[in-house]
Image (tube, rainbow, N blue to C red):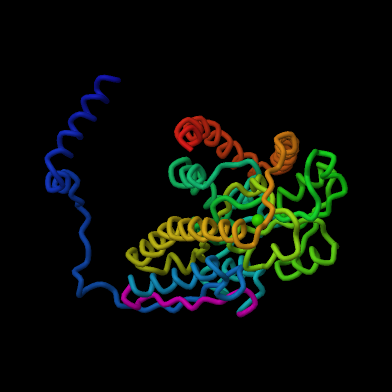
Amino acid sequence: MKNLRRREFLKKSAVAALGSSALISACSDEKKYAEPDKISNEKFEWKMVTAWPPHYPILGESADKMAKEIEVMSSGRLKIKVFGGGELVPALESFDAASQGVADMCHSASYYWAGKVPAAQFFTAIPFGMNSQQAYSWFFNGGGIDLWKEIYDPFNLIPFPAGGTGAQMGGWFNKQINSVADLNGLKMRIPGIGGKVMNKAGGSSVLSAGAEIYTNLERGVIDAAEWVGPYHDYLMGFHKIAKYYYYPGWQEPASFVELLVNKNSFNGLPDDLKKIIETVATSHCLSMFSTFEQKNAEYYNKLKNEEKVDFRKFPDDVLAVLKKYTEEVLQEMTDSDPMSKKVYDSYKKFQKISSVWTYTAENNYM
Ligand code: CA
């Protein structure tokens, strides 16, 4: 078996060495396509709702860009009008709008829908979970997308990964975190699974919408808040009211965005338009991620050198305790929901194998 595989590999390598023309003839596709002048010229006008404020930096901008790209690639056959949160429906009703056909698409983050689909959280962010490159590997090659489709199928929605924030920061604090005891009584704006972990650690997670975080932090209603990373946090102005900026972002080592398409709308499209949607969404996994990486690097330096922000690293024992509580929270989630268990089993298995490789190749290099 081993020898056979080796021989096959060598044969393919020899074909590759002959050049691309040999490869093309070796892989020629038998599928017959319509002649260009016979392509359906049926036109579609769709609506996309989003979970972000209109044209929100990077996230909303990516939705706008995606609609434009689909229109250009389809030569105007599929036009998509984008609505920011509150323009057609409130941001947190965008899932239902796409599910029920009020809109054809929804651009959002899956953890917003945890109340309806607990397992959805695994497709946005898991504390101490996989980083961006690991999670993309799981989505595209480790069965992640199939599970994502399975959990949304009852809602008449087809999901596509559509980008992500990369690593986030741990958040802005007005109290120093020098030991586990400092988490006691800490009031922090931290949503999702991270919030549950903070509660177990003796703190209290507070839910506040984006616009309220600044005033709550300024007035001392909360002691700390996590948002995204240097670029978005700078735009929010947190450096003006908080003393310390902590890292790493244990609660969201990577966070992802989804493009949801109403199944009836999708099935009503010709194959080429379906493929355009999928391809554009996939291309945004790279374009959004690379935009976040570039902006965060730029604004990290700006916060450090121009704004003289006091960056702090969480102590190792604090991270160890948060990790232990994360495992407990995930255990509780998977005990109470079979679909969460199915998704997490796949996630965990992939993370275990992938982490050995990532650590060997990346950490040692860095
Ligand atoms: Ca966050």
In which quadrant of the rendered view does residue 269 lie? bottom left
Residue 78 lies in the magenta stretch: yes
Q: Is residue 197 above or below residue 55?
A: above
- Classify the position of ligand 1 by quadrant: top left, top right, bottom left or bottom right: bottom right
The residue shown at (69%, 62%) is: 239
Q: In the figure, is residue 230 to the left or right of 38?
A: right
Is residue 76 located in the magenta-colored stretch of the structure?
yes
Measured from the top left, where is residue 211 in percent x and y? Answer: 72, 71
In this rendering, position of residue 287 left or right of residue 338: left
Query: x and y percent of residue 169 in the render?
Result: 64, 52
Q: Is residue 319 left or right of residue 283?
A: right
Q: Position of residue 55 (x, y in %)?
A: 55, 74
Q: Quadrant of the N terminus?
A: top left
Residue at 66 percent of width and 47 percent of height: 247
Residue 346 visible: yes
Q: Is residue 198 above or below residue 208?
A: above
Can residue 335 be spotted in the picture? no
Residue closest to the eye, 339 or 255:
255
Write down the quadrant of residue 191 in the picture.
bottom right
Magenta region: 74-87
The outermost residue toward the right is 185
* Horizontal and vertical percent position of residue 119: 64, 48
Q: Does residue 142 lie above or below 169 as drawn?
A: above
Who's the residue at 38% across and 64% down the image?
274
